[in-house]
Amino acid sequence: MGEVSEQDLVALIGQFEGSEWRELHVKRADFELFLSKDPVPAGWTAIAAFPQLEAPDDRPAATPALTLPPPTPVAAPRSAGVTGNLPAGWTVIRAPNLGTFYRAPKPGAAMFTDVGAAVSAGTEVCLIEVMKLFTSVRSETAGIVREVYPKDGDLVEFDQPLFLVEPGDG
Protein backbone atom coordinates (compact mmCIF):
# COMPACT_ATOMS: atom_id res chain seq x y z
CA MET A 1 0.00 0.00 0.00
CA GLY A 2 1.21 3.51 -0.75
CA GLU A 3 2.15 6.08 1.83
CA VAL A 4 -0.52 8.55 2.98
CA SER A 5 0.52 12.06 1.93
CA GLU A 6 -0.13 15.29 3.77
CA GLN A 7 -2.32 16.41 0.85
CA ASP A 8 -4.45 13.25 1.24
CA LEU A 9 -4.90 13.94 4.95
CA VAL A 10 -5.78 17.59 4.43
CA ALA A 11 -8.34 16.61 1.77
CA LEU A 12 -9.88 13.88 3.92
CA ILE A 13 -10.09 16.07 7.03
CA GLY A 14 -11.60 18.90 4.99
CA GLN A 15 -14.21 16.55 3.54
CA PHE A 16 -15.03 15.27 7.04
CA GLU A 17 -15.37 18.81 8.44
CA GLY A 18 -17.70 19.82 5.59
CA SER A 19 -19.87 16.74 5.95
CA GLU A 20 -22.69 15.79 8.29
CA TRP A 21 -20.72 12.74 9.44
CA ARG A 22 -20.23 12.47 13.21
CA GLU A 23 -17.25 10.09 13.04
CA LEU A 24 -14.77 8.76 10.50
CA HIS A 25 -12.39 5.85 11.01
CA VAL A 26 -9.86 4.97 8.29
CA LYS A 27 -7.62 1.97 8.90
CA ARG A 28 -4.93 0.55 6.65
CA ALA A 29 -2.08 -1.82 7.40
CA ASP A 30 0.36 1.06 7.95
CA PHE A 31 -1.99 3.89 8.94
CA GLU A 32 -5.01 4.60 11.13
CA LEU A 33 -7.03 7.82 11.45
CA PHE A 34 -10.01 8.46 13.70
CA LEU A 35 -11.97 11.74 13.49
CA SER A 36 -14.99 12.65 15.61
CA LYS A 37 -17.15 15.73 16.06
CA ASP A 38 -18.41 14.41 19.39
CA PRO A 39 -16.62 15.31 22.66
CA VAL A 40 -16.62 11.63 23.66
CA PRO A 41 -16.87 9.35 20.60
CA ALA A 42 -19.33 6.44 20.63
CA GLY A 43 -17.94 3.38 22.37
CA TRP A 44 -15.31 5.38 24.24
CA THR A 45 -15.38 6.29 27.88
CA ALA A 46 -14.24 9.59 29.28
CA ILE A 47 -10.86 9.42 30.95
CA ALA A 48 -11.05 10.54 34.56
CA ALA A 49 -8.49 13.08 35.70
CA PHE A 50 -6.02 11.66 38.19
CA PRO A 51 -4.99 13.68 41.23
CA GLN A 52 -1.56 15.28 40.99
CA LEU A 53 1.01 13.28 42.93
CA GLU A 54 3.67 15.06 44.91
CA ALA A 55 7.18 14.54 43.55
CA PRO A 56 9.91 13.46 45.97
CA ASP A 57 12.58 16.09 46.73
CA ASP A 58 15.40 14.07 45.15
CA ARG A 59 13.70 14.08 41.79
CA PRO A 60 15.44 16.19 39.08
CA ALA A 61 13.83 19.48 38.15
CA ALA A 62 11.28 19.31 35.38
CA THR A 63 12.62 20.04 31.93
CA PRO A 64 10.92 22.76 29.94
CA ALA A 65 8.31 21.60 27.46
CA LEU A 66 9.45 21.14 23.91
CA THR A 67 8.34 24.03 21.74
CA LEU A 68 7.38 23.01 18.23
CA PRO A 69 7.35 25.42 15.32
CA PRO A 70 3.89 26.43 14.09
CA PRO A 71 2.48 24.08 11.45
CA THR A 72 3.30 24.90 7.87
CA PRO A 73 0.21 26.34 6.20
CA VAL A 74 -1.12 24.32 3.30
CA ALA A 75 -1.85 26.35 0.20
CA ALA A 76 -5.56 26.74 -0.36
CA PRO A 77 -6.78 25.39 -3.68
CA ARG A 78 -7.38 27.89 -6.45
CA SER A 79 -11.00 28.90 -6.12
CA ALA A 80 -12.78 28.66 -9.42
CA GLY A 81 -15.94 30.66 -9.66
CA VAL A 82 -18.72 31.24 -12.08
CA THR A 83 -18.45 34.81 -13.29
CA GLY A 84 -21.44 36.99 -14.06
CA ASN A 85 -25.06 35.90 -14.31
CA LEU A 86 -25.82 32.57 -15.93
CA PRO A 87 -28.20 32.51 -18.87
CA ALA A 88 -31.54 30.87 -18.08
CA GLY A 89 -31.40 27.09 -18.09
CA TRP A 90 -27.61 26.79 -18.02
CA THR A 91 -26.26 24.30 -15.47
CA VAL A 92 -23.17 24.37 -13.29
CA ILE A 93 -21.78 20.94 -12.46
CA ARG A 94 -20.26 21.20 -8.99
CA ALA A 95 -17.84 19.05 -7.02
CA PRO A 96 -19.72 16.52 -4.84
CA ASN A 97 -16.74 16.38 -2.46
CA LEU A 98 -13.25 17.75 -2.19
CA GLY A 99 -10.29 16.03 -3.75
CA THR A 100 -8.08 16.00 -6.82
CA PHE A 101 -9.88 16.77 -10.11
CA TYR A 102 -9.10 14.47 -13.06
CA ARG A 103 -10.37 15.03 -16.61
CA ALA A 104 -9.42 11.53 -17.81
CA PRO A 105 -9.87 8.02 -16.36
CA LYS A 106 -6.10 7.48 -16.26
CA PRO A 107 -2.93 9.30 -17.34
CA GLY A 108 -2.59 9.43 -21.11
CA ALA A 109 -6.22 8.43 -21.75
CA ALA A 110 -8.70 10.61 -23.61
CA MET A 111 -10.53 13.22 -21.52
CA PHE A 112 -14.09 12.48 -20.48
CA THR A 113 -15.27 15.76 -22.04
CA ASP A 114 -14.01 19.15 -23.19
CA VAL A 115 -15.33 22.61 -24.06
CA GLY A 116 -17.75 22.34 -26.99
CA ALA A 117 -18.51 18.65 -26.40
CA ALA A 118 -22.09 17.42 -26.13
CA VAL A 119 -23.06 15.60 -22.94
CA SER A 120 -26.18 13.66 -22.05
CA ALA A 121 -27.80 13.37 -18.65
CA GLY A 122 -25.69 10.80 -16.82
CA THR A 123 -22.53 11.32 -18.90
CA GLU A 124 -19.37 10.94 -16.83
CA VAL A 125 -17.48 14.25 -17.04
CA CYS A 126 -14.60 13.81 -14.55
CA LEU A 127 -13.25 11.98 -11.50
CA ILE A 128 -12.47 13.38 -8.07
CA GLU A 129 -9.97 11.41 -5.99
CA VAL A 130 -9.32 11.58 -2.28
CA MET A 131 -7.04 9.02 -0.58
CA LYS A 132 -7.18 6.61 -3.54
CA LEU A 133 -10.99 6.66 -3.60
CA PHE A 134 -12.45 7.92 -6.86
CA THR A 135 -15.84 9.61 -7.23
CA SER A 136 -17.34 9.70 -10.70
CA VAL A 137 -18.99 13.05 -11.49
CA ARG A 138 -21.83 12.94 -14.02
CA SER A 139 -23.83 15.57 -15.85
CA GLU A 140 -27.38 15.93 -14.61
CA THR A 141 -28.62 17.49 -17.86
CA ALA A 142 -28.03 17.20 -21.59
CA GLY A 143 -26.21 20.03 -23.32
CA ILE A 144 -22.93 21.49 -24.54
CA VAL A 145 -19.96 22.00 -22.20
CA ARG A 146 -19.12 25.73 -22.36
CA GLU A 147 -16.55 26.03 -19.54
CA VAL A 148 -14.19 23.75 -17.62
CA TYR A 149 -13.06 25.66 -14.52
CA PRO A 150 -10.32 23.62 -12.76
CA LYS A 151 -7.21 22.30 -14.46
CA ASP A 152 -6.44 18.59 -14.52
CA GLY A 153 -4.82 17.66 -11.20
CA ASP A 154 -6.17 20.70 -9.29
CA LEU A 155 -7.42 20.26 -5.74
CA VAL A 156 -11.11 21.17 -5.72
CA GLU A 157 -13.37 21.96 -2.79
CA PHE A 158 -16.85 20.67 -2.02
CA ASP A 159 -19.47 22.47 -4.15
CA GLN A 160 -16.83 24.19 -6.29
CA PRO A 161 -17.96 24.80 -9.90
CA LEU A 162 -16.35 22.32 -12.31
CA PHE A 163 -18.23 22.69 -15.60
CA LEU A 164 -20.74 25.04 -17.19
CA VAL A 165 -23.28 23.33 -19.47
CA GLU A 166 -25.53 25.08 -21.97
CA PRO A 167 -28.85 23.24 -22.35
CA GLY A 168 -29.41 21.32 -25.55
CA ASP A 169 -29.47 17.84 -27.05
CA GLY A 170 -26.55 15.80 -25.80
Image (cartoon, rainbow, N blue to C red):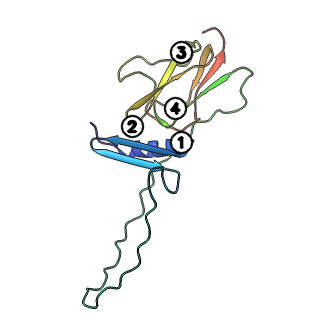
Is 88 displayed left or right of 137 in the figure? Answer: right
Q: Nearer the viewer, mark 1 or mark 2?
A: 1
Q: Are marks 2 and 3 in contact (CB under 8 Å)?
A: no
**Which image quadrant is residue 118 in?**
top right
Judging by the rendered image, the residue that carries numbered circle 3 is 123
Q: Nearer the viewer, mark 2 or mark 3?
A: 2
Q: Earlier in the sequence, mark 4 or mark 2?
A: 2
Judging by the rendered image, the residue that carries numbered circle 4 is 150
Task: Compute the Cα span from label 4 to label 1.
Answer: 27 Å
State the residue at coordinates (35%, 44%): 5
Estimate how packed mark 3 is, as few (under 14), some (14 to 19) or many (20 or more) residues with alpha carbons within 10 Å.
some
Q: Nearer the viewer, mark 4 or mark 2?
A: 2
Q: Nearer the viewer, mark 3 or mark 1?
A: 1
Q: Earlier in the sequence, mark 4 or mark 1?
A: 1
Estimate how packed mark 4 is, as few (under 14), some (14 to 19) or many (20 or more) residues with alpha carbons within 10 Å.
many
> Mark 4 falls on what kind of element?
loop
From this view, report whether residue 50 is shown above or below residue 36. Answer: below
Q: Nearer the viewer, mark 3 or mark 4?
A: 3
> Mark 2 falls on what kind of element?
loop
Along the line of sight, the residue nearer the viewer: 98 or 22: 22
Residue type at numbered disc 4: Pro
Task: Compute the Cα span from label 3 to label 4.
Answer: 18 Å
Task: Compute the Cα span from label 3 to label 1.
Answer: 28 Å
Along the line of sight, the residue nearer the viewer: 157 or 132: 132
Q: Earlier in the sequence, mark 3 or mark 4?
A: 3
- Residue 106 position in % (x across, y down): 37, 23
